[in-house]
Image (cartoon, rainbow, N blue to C red):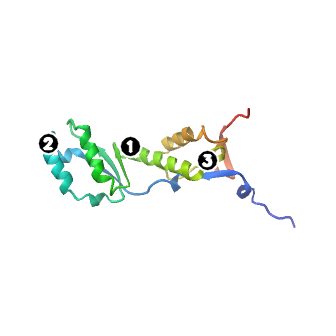
Amino acid sequence: MEEIVNRVAKSPLVSVDLEDYLHSGETVIFDVKDVLFEGIILKEKDFRTFLKDNDWSVYQDKNVGLICSAEAIVPTWAYMLLVTKLKPVANSVTFGDKEDVEKSLIDEAIASCIRENDLKEKKVVIKGCGNVKNIEYAYTKVTDQLLPLVTSLMYGEPCSTVPIYKQRKN
């Protein structure tokens, strides 16, 4: 009887599932409007008091987006100060809405994936059909990041792939 050989397991392909690298924590939005005087003016002294007295632990391990939904001019340093309070407790802090936070998390996941797998000059399969939010952004971005590194890029599962890119041989 002939031995059954798992060709996928012996393949030089590196299979990457972006979901394995995405932080699954809750995403919350911090609206600066809520700490403005009369909803339109940022008073530095009051803002600094809020920063000092607020319970930042409620943002523990969350992905935080910073926005201002009011028609107000918020100085850049205000967002910078918020990051100094949020970063020690939150998983991530991004300027923008929920979609911006998702994109930022995707960017972090791709960077982490590339670092951990050393994908330089490898044949890579990006796993498809997952629960990645903002999927078009994710797959466009991962393709952009991997093209300069990999010898070939595929989409799908190692047993059934769609070829995306193959480096030309010189």
Q: Is residue 90 left or right of residue 148?
A: left
- Asked if residue 90 is positioned above or below residue 120 in the image, the reply reads below
For disc 1, the marked residue is 100
Between 98 and 129, the residue placed more toward the observer is 98
- Numbered disc in front, either 1 or 2: 2
Task: Pinpoint residue 98: horizontal percent, then vertical percent.
Answer: 36, 46
The image quarter containing residue 57 is bottom left
Tell me the element at label 1.
Answer: helix
The structure residue drawn at horizontal position 14% and vertical position 42%, both measured from the top left corner, is: 43
Q: Which residue is mark 3?
A: 119
Residue 108 x %, y %: 46, 48
Residue 91 vs residue 18, the one in the foreground: 91
Residue identifier under label 2: 43
Q: Earlier in the sequence, mark 1 or mark 2?
A: 2
Q: Amino acid at mark 1?
A: Asp
- Label 2 and label 3: CA atoms lie apart by 49 Å
Q: Secondary structure at mark 3?
A: loop
Q: Quadrant of residue 96?
A: top left
Q: Which amino acid lies under the numbered mark 3 shown in the image of this protein?
A: Leu
Left or right of residue 63, residue 75 in this image? left
Q: Position of residue 141 (x, y in %)?
A: 51, 40
Q: CA distance from mark 3 to mark 1?
A: 27 Å
Query: Contact (CB < 8 A) between labels 3 and 1?
Result: no
59 vs 84, nearest the viewer: 84
In the picture, measured across the screen, residue 125 lies left or right of residue 101, that is right
Q: Residue at x 64, y 47 (%)?
A: 124
